[in-house]
Image (cartoon, rainbow, N blue to C red):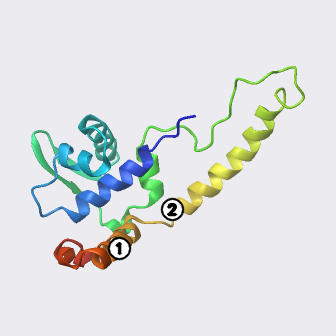
Amino acid sequence: MKHSVQFSDAVHILAYIAIFQESNQLSSTDIAASIQTNPSNVRKIMCQLRDANLIKTINGIPKPCLVKDPHDISFFDIYQSLEHAQLFQIDTNTEPKCIVGGNIQDVLSDEYLLLQQVVEEKMKHIFLSSVLQKISQAELAKNPMNKEFVAEFL
């Protein structure tokens, strides 16, 4: 079973752009190195973030920037920007003649819909700014010499 990390990567990209906004380390290759993925994956996610008006990019210029303040970018905004399936997936390959296999899809569908709604509502109250603050605090504790990069998020 493979779980998508696209949401996590999108949050990572936005945090990276915010923290390194004044540097020359904003190419998709630089960001991909931080995520440990390939640059084409970063570009794909960045296109989705751009289309959702969360970042601004210019082709050929490695200087993406946030369009909104991190206090105004919720996890829900990020989640909505991505091409995604529901958070919870139902296995549709079950034995229809089995008591469990023949009924579990309908039962789980209702439960997963409820969970989806609850999670999406919670996402509306978690902001990129809190992630940036926690990253900054953690980095400052580990590497005080990087204070210049993270000071504005503390």
- Three-letter amino acid code of the residue under disc 1: Ala
Disc 2 target residue: 124
Horizontal placement of 49 versus 61: left or right? right
Percent of width and height locating residue 132: 34, 68
Percent of width and height locating residue 138: 35, 73
Does the image show residue 67?
no
Q: Is residue 18 above or below residue 104?
A: below
Of residues 41 and 116, the one nearer the viewer is: 41
Horizontal placement of 56 versus 138: left or right? left
Q: Residue at x 63, y 49 (%)?
A: 116
Secondary element at image label 2:
loop
* Tag 2 near tag 1, CB within 8 Å: no
Q: Quadrant of the C terminus?
A: bottom left
- Three-letter amino acid code of the residue under disc 2: Lys
Q: Quadrant of the N terminus?
A: top right
Q: Residue at x 19, y 49 (%)?
A: 30
Cα distance in 3D space between marks 2 and 1: 24 Å
> Hey, which quadrant is residue 105 in on the image?
top right
Does the image show residue 150?
yes
Percent of width and height locating residue 14: 31, 56
Residue at the front extreme of this rendering: 142
* Mark closer to the observer (2, 1): 1
> Hey, which quadrant is residue 32 in on the image?
top left
Horizontal placement of 154 versus 8: left or right? left
Which of the numbered marks, if any, corresponds to residue 138?
1
Of residues 81 and 129, the one nearer the viewer is: 129
Residue at the right extreme of this rendering: 99
